[in-house]
Image (tube, rainbow, N blue to C red):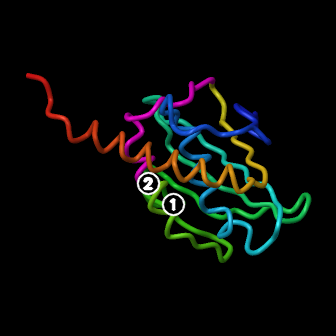
Amino acid sequence: MSAHAGRENRSMKPAENKSLEQAIESAIVLSWADLMRGAQTGLIHVEYGFAPTGTLDYLKVLSSIGRGHWLVACEYWMSADTSHSIGIRFENGYESEGLACILEFLMQHQNSFTVPPNLGWQGLLQISTPSEGERAVAAISVNEAIHNSVSLLAQPALA
């Protein structure tokens, strides 16, 4: 697996350039407590892969509470296969209604965001334990991203 983007310990800014990666990262930060199961620190990996159209076909969220021990928390698929259905599926006892709603919105409205370039391999976001300030910024970022996307969707098409 190749890492497209390592995002450890970088400060997040409110959604300014509407990057899908930043919106996904903010969704993870907002759902941190659900993904860490009460642990004070941890690490999250978000793997993603592309469809032939250049959009994201899937996301896989992995949680690490203990060094070297990873669990798949959830997967989101845009297309069905014999091994999975369309949409989000939580695994290993993980559940997060908030993360499910945000990922559903982001994946279904990818065209409202800047999608990472498909460089021929899987992408990877690595997210470390956020500070309280980063959590606050993540909430603002997700709200702005959703609001801006809904505003774009509500605009009438030009004739």
Residue visible at 44% across and 61% down in the picture: 101
- As drawn, the label of residue 84 is 1
Asked whether, in this view, residue 42 is left or right of residue 155, the answer is right
- The image quarter containing residue 124 is top right
Seen at 42% across and 39% down, the residue is 110
> Could you say where residue 157 lies in the image, as x and y percent from the top left?
15, 29
**In the figure, is residue 52 to the left or right of 34?**
left
Q: Which residues are magenta?
A: 105-119
Q: Residue furthest right?
A: 67
**Mark number displayed over residue 80:** 2
Dot 1 amino acid type:
His
Question: Where on the picture, by quarter, is residue 154?
Answer: top left
Q: Is residue 111 magenta?
A: yes
**For the point 51% across and 60% down, which residue is it?**
84
Residue 159, horizontal then vertical, whole percent: 8, 22
- Quarter in which the N terminus is drawn: top right
Q: Are marks 2 and 1 in contact (CB under 8 Å)?
A: yes
In the image, residue 42 lies in the stretch drawn in magenta: no
Task: Give the percent coordinates (x, y) of residue 29.
Answer: 64, 55
- Side of 85 where 61 appears, left or right: right
Q: Position of residue 14 (x, y in %)?
A: 55, 39
Query: Please, what secondary structure does the residue beneath circle 1 have?
Result: loop
Label 2's element? loop
Residue situated in front as seen by the camera: 5 or 85 = 5
**What's the residue type where badge 2 is placed?**
Ala
Q: Quadrant of residue 123?
A: top right
Whole-angstrom CA distance, mark 2 to mark 1, is 6 Å
